Image (cartoon, rainbow, N blue to C red):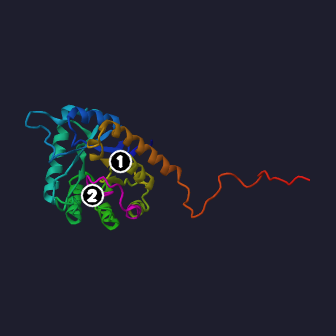
């Protein structure tokens, strides 16, 4: 699979996976490995890097292998998101991890839907870009908002397939297709990543077949009945969906077309 370029980062895998909701840190580490991802995202605010028992999430992550993408999950306004992004940068800079210069921005509107607040998200994007961050920004599948975020300087716009953790897949293929048209117009290499809503491997393949450059997911692996098997399935689906997009699907037709040519068909002649 070809590499994915986001700002100054080049990723070997087009699958980015989260580190939350696993039963144990050991299970998380196994699934990260099986997913094939070389970029993982960590919630700076929600995930306590060192828990009450002294366990450190980063003790179970090979920081020389993975580029860590800190995220601002749990923030509900631009001010908090910018503060958390700066905290993540300080943590990763101390670890000498290349992920210190970027952030996955989430500015949520409310806890019930976890939908992004578009006004706070644009404001936070502008502030973080001015502060030197490469901003990967979670947003809805609204094409106009997606365009505004790119104009604000986002290194990647990441439309949601459906609400976070819902497992509903890509609900509005038309909106996502328009997002791609808006974001890649005169800039075909601009990275667009589906973030949120994935429930199964087929959701990943379907998103990649639409032409997005990558998929970011967490719950679909961490809460699967067999997380390790699902991690492997997600890796295969991402690769298959990308290959299928590049290969180009045949047009959909109303009527059937025979697979075999009409020429040379054996015809039976009546005897006598």
In the image, is residue 117 above or below residue 235?
Answer: below
Q: Which residue is mark 2?
A: 163
Q: Earlier in the sequence, mark 2 or mark 1?
A: 2
Q: Quadrant of residue 28?
A: top left
Q: Is residue 262 left or right of residue 46?
A: right
Question: Taking 247 as reference, is 38 above or below it?
Answer: above
Q: Which residue is mark 1?
A: 200
Residue 92 visible within the image: yes
Is residue 225 positioned above or below 170 on the image?
Answer: above
Q: Secondary structure at mark 1?
A: loop
Q: Position of residue 237 (x, y in %)?
A: 41, 44
Residue 192 screen position, x and y as percent: 36, 54
Q: Is 186 a magenta residue?
A: no
In this rendered view, identify the residue nearer to me: 80 or 208: 208
Is any atom of residue 12 visible in this view?
no
Q: Quadrant of the N terminus?
A: top left
Secondary element at image label 2:
loop
Q: Residue at x 45, y 52 (%)?
A: 209
Q: Position of residue 122 (x, y in %)?
A: 24, 63
What residue occupies the far left of the structure in this picture? 52
Residue 176 part of the magenta-drawn span = yes
Packing grade of label 1 (10 A; few <14, some 14-19, many >=20) is some
> Left of 157 or right of it: where is 267?
right
The Cα–Cα distance between marks 2 and 1, rounded to whole angstroms, is: 14 Å
Q: Where does the magenta region start and end?
A: 160-177
Residue sitting nearer the eye, 265 or 22: 265
Q: Is residue 179 above or below residue 44?
A: below
């Amino acid at each position: 699979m070809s590499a994915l370029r986001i700002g100054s980062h080049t990723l070997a895998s087009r699958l980015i996976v989260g580190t939350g909701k696993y039963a144990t840190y050991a299970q998380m580490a196994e699934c990260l490995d099986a997913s094939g991802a070389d970029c993982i995202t960590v919630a700076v605010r929600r995930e306590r890097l060192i828990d009450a028992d002294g366990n450190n999430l980063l003790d179970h992550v090979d920081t020389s292998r993975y580029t860590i993408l800190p995220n601002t999950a749990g923030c509900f306004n631009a001010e908090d998101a910018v503060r958390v992004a700066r905290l993540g940068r300080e943590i990763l800079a101390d670890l000498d991890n290349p992920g210190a210069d970027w952030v996955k921005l989430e500015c949520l509107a409310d806890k019930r839907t976890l939908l992004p607040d578009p006004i706070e998200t644009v404001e936070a994007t502008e502030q973080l870009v001015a502060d030197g961050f490469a901003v990967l920004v979670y947003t809805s599948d609204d094409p106009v908002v997606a365009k505004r975020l790119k104009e604000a300087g986002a290194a990647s716009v990441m439309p949601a397939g459906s609400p976070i953790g819902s497992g509903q897949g890509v609900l509005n293929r038309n909106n996502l297709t328009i997002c791609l048209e808006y974001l890649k117009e005169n800039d075909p290499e601009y990275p667009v990543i589906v973030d949120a809503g994935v429930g199964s491997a087929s959701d990943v393949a379907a998103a990649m077949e639409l032409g997005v450059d990558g998929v970011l997911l967490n719950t679909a692996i961490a809460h699967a009945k067999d997380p390790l098997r699902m991690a492997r399935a997600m890796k295969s689906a991402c690769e298959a969906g990308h290959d299928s997009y590049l290969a180009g699907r045949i047009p959909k037709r109303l009527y059937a077309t025979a697979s075999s040519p009409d020429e040379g068909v054996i015809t039976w002649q009546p005897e006598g």
